Image: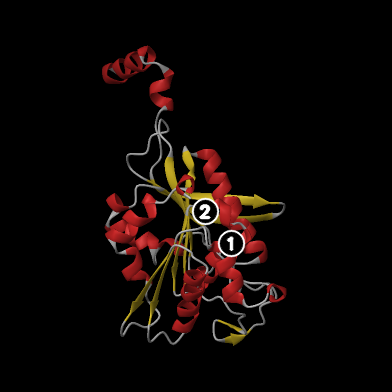
Amino acid sequence: MFRLGAFMAIALVLPTSVFAQRIETGFLNRAVVDGTETRRYQVFVPSDYTPSQRWPVILFLHGGGEQGDDGLLQTQVGLGSAIRLHADRWPAIVVFPQVRPGKRWNAQDAAWALKALEQTQRKFATDPNRVYLTGLSRGGAGAYYLAYRDPGRFAAVLISCGRVTLAATLGGQPAPDLDPVIPASDGDPFEALAAKLKNTPVWVFHGDVDATISVEESRRATAALKRAGGSVTYTELPGVGHNAWDTAYGSNEVAKWLFAQRRTNR
């Protein structure tokens, strides 16, 4: 009883703000509610986060292997894994939405990803001039999709083995793409992409023996960006198949490059 009473006495004299100041960090469960639909996602918050400063924010789009409804799997491949290994390299708020099974990062799923990003920006102290977009494989195509439609939102784009051209399959099965990365009416997809992203710094990674998404997608995209006068870096990995993302997200140089980009630099 004495110990409990002593604790209660201490609690009574402490200001309530001491208890209100607790801030959750690490990988946090979150959800977007859109009408009757609820989509789970994750937000990573650095251990030293404080709302007294504005933080960079990254929107990460995962690949097809992490599609689902659990709201968790998308943190286990790519950027999530890199953060768990080297959290010090990624001093940012990171948003991890999850695409529905059998869907692409377009249409409603792309809209939900942006809702998760915007919800996170309202909740945490983030820097609107340091919002970054990245994705791998299916998420690489999704990153191109979002950047193409709103290039002014992002300070930089990091792509790993992404596709630009119209897709006819999904997960190895026939699946026409009714909402492609580049609308057919916009002409050559690579030239159209370059025209939109020529003022956005872009870094692209791709393995030269990728059997899932042809390396020609990245070669042609970066060549078009260079012709348009864009700020683009292309890293082609010799002898590497589809997994170019471990190299991209595992690179301290890439992380430093990303955080150096600001919209005000343009």
Numbered label tally = 2
First-in-chain label (2 vs 1): 1
Q: Give above or below for 238 relative to 19.
A: below
Residue drawn at 42 percent across, 61 percent down: 75
The amino acid type of the residue labelled 2 equals Phe
Residue occupied by mark 2: 154
Q: Residues within 10 Å of mark 2 (few under 14, many from 20)?
A: many
Residue 30 screen position, x and y as percent: 52, 49
Residue 182 screen position, x and y as percent: 63, 72
Residue 244 screen position, x and y as percent: 37, 74
Residue drawn at 33 percent across, 42 percent down: 47
Q: Give above or below for 7 relative to 30.
A: above
Element type at mark 1: helix
**Horizontal side, residue 245 vs residue 70: left or right:** left
Q: Label 1 near label 2: C-beta < 8 Å?
A: yes
Residue drawn at 67 percent across, 76 percent down: 187
Residue 104 seen anywhere in this rendered image of the structure: no
The amino acid type of the residue labelled 1 equals Leu
- Type of colouring: secondary structure
Residue occupied by mark 1: 146
**Horizontal side, residue 71 vs residue 237: left or right:** right
In this orientation, which residue lies closer to the viewer: 235 or 239? 235
- Indicate the quadrant containing the N terminus: top left, top right, bottom left or bottom right: top left
